[in-house]
Amino acid sequence: MIATVKVFALVYPTEVQEKVKTAVMNLIPVKLLLQDFGMPGLYGKGNLESLRKLHQLLREHLILDTARQVFMNGIEGNSIHFKVNKQVAYMGKVNFPAGEESLGSIRVEISAENEEALIKIIDWLSPRTVGGKPVEEIEL
């Protein structure tokens, strides 16, 4: 299955670039490049392998149902768009903010070749659960 993962986080003047990089890498380890978007930002691109850490963290922190809802609500065509709290990610945890954050969020886009493949990625990352336990774990 072919998928592309893009990750982006602005580095605000009050932030340390290395800490923002650590926050991103704690969730989605990809090679990050510093780019100027009118403000410095870290941008990286990866594939399904880049999502293994996020896959693991969603299970460790018992947030599969929340993640699934965020992913399903973030579907746009053949992509999923969602945000992750930067400060929580720095601590190696996952939190999906409800709105815009004062220091911005880590923005993630996962794209697949078609909607069926995208749903399969969601099922792998955050399967349906019963009593908080996955109904079925699939491999990609």
Image (cartoon, rainbow, N blue to C red):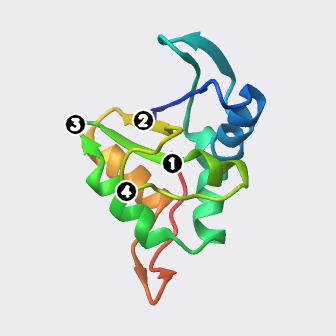
Going 27% across and 45% down the picture, which residue do you hit? 75
Residue 111 or residue 87, whichever sits in front: 87
Mark-to-mark CA distance, 3 and 1: 21 Å
- Which residue, given by chain and number where applicable, does mark 4 sit on? 98
Question: Relative to residue 107, is residue 68 depicted above or below?
Answer: below
**2 or 4: mark nearer the eye:** 4
- Which residue, given by chain and number where applicable, does mark 1 sit on? 84
Mark-to-mark CA distance, 4 and 1: 10 Å
The part of the image, by quadrant, that contains residue 14 is top right
Q: Amino acid at mark 1?
A: Val
Question: Relative to residue 10, is residue 118 depicted above or below?
Answer: below
**1 or 2: mark nearer the eye:** 1
State the SS at label 2.
strand
Upstream in sequence: badge 4 or badge 1: 1
Label number found at residue 77: 3
Going 62% across and 71% down the picture, which residue do you hit? 61
Q: Amino acid at mark 4?
A: Ala
What is the residue that sits farthest to the front in this orientation?
14
Q: Amino acid at mark 3?
A: Gly
Answer whether labels 1 and 2 touch (C-beta < 8 Å): no
Mark-to-mark CA distance, 3 and 4: 22 Å
